[in-house]
Amino acid sequence: MSAEPIYLDWNATTPPHPEVLSAMARASAETWANPASTHRLGRRARAIVEDAREKLAELCAVHSRDVLFTSGGTEANNLALSRAPGVALTRLEHPSIVRVAEALAARGVPVEWVEASSCGRVEAEAYRIALQRLPRGSVAALMAANHETGVIQPIEKVALVAHELGATLHVDAVQALGKLPPEQWRFADSLSVAAHKIRGPKGIGALAFRGSNAPRPVLLGGSQERGLRPGTVDPVAAAGFLVALDRAIGGPARYCELAELRNDLESSFADVALVNGGEATRLPHVSNLSFMGSSGDELVAALDLLGVCVSSGSACSAGTTEASAVITAMLGRERAQAAVRISLGESTSFDDIQAAKTALRRALGTAERSP
């Protein structure tokens, strides 16, 4: 039997933690009822949901009533922009922000595209220029940390500019939760998170907002989640989310320990690869490398055959022939076509990185021999 593959795609999703799985197994047996039901089984299920909501409120620094459960980060981002009279953003954002902005623009809503720098970090003054062209009450969208490069954005500076101009700031914190301290997004007016990025279950996330910044419902139905997001909340998923959130509090310290492994990987290929976003402050576990003259997609496929799981961009764009929109916006299409994203996680070991380096050298040799 072949060895278990080395998983270096933690930005795509994380393996559910054993404590999360145990909590979900207990909830499946004991708190499976509809949390909107008023009988005792319903109340028991609702207690789990509300415990998870309280923990989210604590981490997001909002009132618990202003935390809406969603199916994940994509739905949360869609909700956040649902009532925007205008949007300012860069092409570095996740597709669940970029595609919504494009749809709003097609409907006549003013959208301003902020220029992306080659290092992947935006400037607050660039948002000022964009927001000055938009109506008051518009939304500036800026992710806390990029999903492909790990570049950390100046949330506080952009928030100050947005508030000065009568705009609000929505922060996609899906990749930042559990990797950065919550203080990084305390100035956000709304915030999206997803459980599966912090070793929780897939299919549950949240939008947190401050008071008057409630979204306009995207779905219509019952009165769950204050009528802002109708549909039955899954108490089993909420139980897993709660455990993952508890673990996320200590996450930044755990992820900082991965910087040495990430840096070792990058230095080993400094002669053949360019680090995308390497000039900016990044999350310590993410490396986006362009192996010029090679195809990122082909390298990913070759590494998979050698037992190493990485990606060539956002998991949401997998299966397409398009080069990474993020790297294209930063550095151009040629650099993007050669890009590979390697993201480490809590269980990544020194031996994993050494084995991955050996596999990558083999994959590069194969690519160089290809016609």
Image: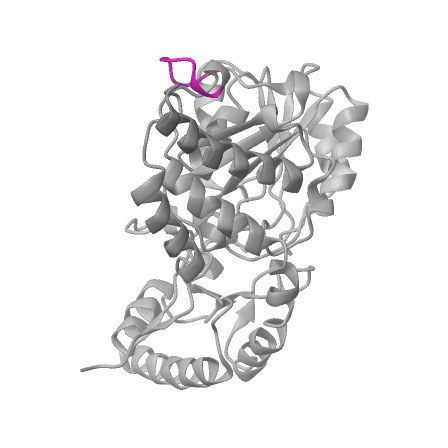
Q: Nearer the viewer, residue 287 or 292?
A: 287
Judge left or right: residue 116 versus residue 300: right
Q: Nearer the viewer, residue 77 or 312?
A: 77
Can you say which quadrant of the picture contains the C terminus? Answer: bottom left
Q: Nearer the viewer, residue 2 or 343?
A: 2
The residue lying at 80 percent from left, 32 percent from top is 160
Q: Main secondary structure of the magenta part?
A: loop
Q: Residue 194, can we see it?
A: yes
Residue 6 position within the rendered picture, expressed as x and y whole percent measured from the top left: 37, 74
In magenta segment, residue 47: no
Residue 202 position within the rendered picture, expressed as x and y whole percent measured from the top left: 37, 46
The residue lying at 60 percent from left, 59 percent from top is 251
Residue 361 position within the rendered picture, expressed as x and y whole percent measured from the top left: 40, 84
From this view, report whether residue 67 is shown above or below residue 366.
above
In magenta segment, residue 219: yes
Judge left or right: residue 129 versus residue 282: right
Residue 173 position within the rendered picture, expressed as x and y whole percent measured from the top left: 58, 43
Q: Nearer the viewer, residue 249 or 118?
A: 249
The residue lying at 38 percent from left, 65 percent from top is 296
Residue range highlighted in magenta: 217-225
Quarter holding residue 339: bottom left
From this view, report whether residue 72 is shown above or below residue 181.
above
Quarter holding residue 274: bottom right
Residue at the limit of the structure toward the front, as seen here:
40
Q: Residue 98, can we see it?
A: no
Can you say which quadrant of the picture contains the N terminus? Answer: bottom left
Residue at the limit of the structure toward the left, as seen here:
1
